[in-house]
Image (cartoon, helix red, strand yellow):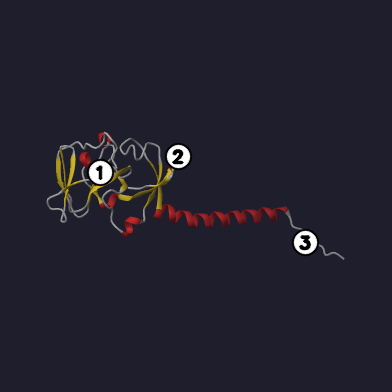
Amino acid sequence: MEGKQPKVKSWQYVLSFIWETAKIIIISLAIIIPIRYFLFQPFFVRGASMEPNFENGEYLIIDEISYRLHEPERGDVVVFKYPKYPSQYYIKRVVALPNEIIKIEDGEVTIFNKENPAGFILDESYLSEGNEFTSGNLEISLSEDDYFVLGDNRKASSDSRKWGLLPRKYIVGRAWLRAWPFDRIGIVLD
């Protein structure tokens, strides 16, 4: 004699489905939210200030955790809140570090620090042909909390030459991964 299986009502299937779906959503959010808000953040490049290294419309993933472990370094490509309007985000390259002096003259960037009191001309091999000349004539001393940032496309960049030094507190993170367009996907090399 075969045993009778209990009759399951259709509403029980619906409730079971809803409960399983809710569990998946809760677990996903528990994983995704901390990653999104504390470790990595998406960023869309807007404008031509970093061309050709970063082009308008590219989708980047920003590493927010590295700078909790160490300070930004010269050559890092950073995303930061624009100091004059912190709701806007910019992307630029770190050129001068805290407690250094930067001098821009005759198209060259010279850095003075403890290790190089006589100064050294910055090697900017990441600049494309035609963008090697850095316009401006300035000399600025950075405090212990300031960074000097420049766009790679010097002719089309609103950067520290125009609006001043970047306080450390505005730096969100460094460009880590290019996720779009597909033909340029990969880790960002500074």
Q: Secondary structure at mark 3?
A: loop
- Residue 167's place in the image compared with 138, above or below, is below
Q: Which residue is mark 2?
A: 183
Residue at image location 28% in from the left, 35% down from the top: 129
Residue at image location 28% in from the left, 56% down from the top: 71
Q: Secondary structure at mark 1?
A: loop
Characterize the local packing of mark 3: few (<14), some (14-19) or many (20 or more) Cα atoms within 10 angstroms: few
Q: Position of residue 175 (x, y in %)?
A: 36, 48
- Residue 186's place in the image compared with 131, above or below, is below
Q: Position of residue 173 (x, y in %)?
A: 34, 51
Instruction: Say which quadrant the N terminus sits in.
Output: bottom right
Q: Which residue is mark 3?
A: 6
Characterize the local packing of mark 1: few (<14), some (14-19) or many (20 or more) Cα atoms within 10 angstroms: some
What's under tag 3, amino acid-wise?
Answer: Pro
Which sits earlier in the primary sequence, circle 1 or circle 3? 3
Which sits earlier in the primary sequence, circle 3 or circle 2? 3
Which of 26/165 is in front?
165
